[in-house]
Amino acid sequence: MKPLRERVSAPDALRLPASVAGVAWRRIVRDDVPLLLELSRACDAVDTPWAVTTEDELALWLDDPKLRLERDSAIGFDDSGRAVAYGFVGQGDVHETVVWIELDGAVHPERRREGIGGALLDWQDERGRRMLAAEDSTLPGRLSVDAGEHEAGTIALAESRGYRVVRWWLELERDLAAPIPEPSLGPGLRFEPYGGNEELTRAARNDSFRDHWGSQPVSEREWREHDELESARPDLSFVVVEGEGETKRVLGFAIGAVYREDWEHRGHSFGYIDLLGVVSDARGRGIAKALLARSLAAMRAEGFERAVLDVDSESLTGAVGLYESVGFETVRRSMTLAREF
């Protein structure tokens, strides 16, 4: 396959989105967090009324060294100086099977259907293609937009620009008042806290997700920054290990998180299972189900009412069936729309 620089075309010029409907654009700067938070909360109320964007999530985006704000960001203002739209064009630290560029943005609900979103997506698509065209890699290239299945406007806009649904994702919930299976591990395996096993767990994550659709390795920096989020709960995170000392190895992990700001919006308290995985050569030994049971029991002990997680609807590891077998049910669906090169 030819390198991406020969497969993808894009203009060299760096520009901002086109000025439409009286919106003036500039680059985002670190001090824009309050503006972005206000705009994101207005969008959340319509697009994701069950969840809200937090300040530390925004700060993490802006501090990402892979996100060059002077090139890969835009924020739009109306005549009164109110922020009414924003957009980012970002990518991960490591590309192993695909060079994946993610397009993230939003338009204030009061200013939709005025062409602002189209101008924003056109700019993001151009900037994303420019990033792909700078790559010597022969890997596939992908530009993607995420949307909930209820976000008809976003879906129609993306499809009008040539984006197509390439993956569906499920959000599942479970009542923690229902019986929880007793966690059980085979000989030579034991539970340990996540704390103190961070790097071994990152290695296990990269192995276990290697065959998952679109998944790329997580760098040490990305893993560390995730652990620093306010939502991170190492006390609700567990690993299954075998061996001792230099032979010690994490075979499976369940990483928990708590998004307290979302409790009011959902109408109940809940714990979130951010990651659950088992390394490829240890699958089929009941490790995932044991970790899931351990996590559910810990969340119940905290007094949470429900457990929540997200999963690839076409997971090759049978994850959907595993979750359903212990009482999880699908509550909503979302999708990834993409252009692929």
Image (cartoon, helix red, strand yellow):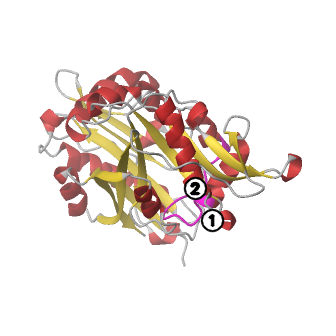
Query: What residue is drawn where x is 46% and y is 27%?
Result: 56
Instruction: Tell me if residue 284 comes above or below residue 272 in the rendering.
Output: below
Residue 298, compared with residue 113, is above or below; it is above
- State the image coordinates of residue 48 (x, y, percent, origin top left): 26, 39
Q: Residue at x 70, y 58 (%)?
A: 186
State whether residue 129 appears in this view: no
Horizontal and vertical percent for residue 74? 35, 37
Q: Earlier in the sequence, mark 1 or mark 2?
A: 1
Neighbor class of circle 2 (other Cα within 10 Å; few <14, some 14-19, many 20+) is many
Q: What is the secondary structure assignment of the residue under circle 2?
A: helix
Inspect the magenta stretch and tell me whether residue 211 lies in it: yes
Residue hosting label 1: 283
- Depth order, front residue of 162/156: 156
Tag 1 and tag 2, C-beta contact below 8 Å = yes
**Residue 260 falls left or right of residue 6:** left
Which residue is denoted by mark 2 in the rendering?
A: 288
- Residue 156 inside the magenta-drawn segment: no
Where 82 sits versus 318, above or below?
above
Q: Secondary structure at mark 1?
A: loop
Looking at the magenta stretch, what is its main secondary structure?
Answer: loop
For the residues marked 1 and 2, what is the alpha-carbon distance in whole angstroms? 8 Å
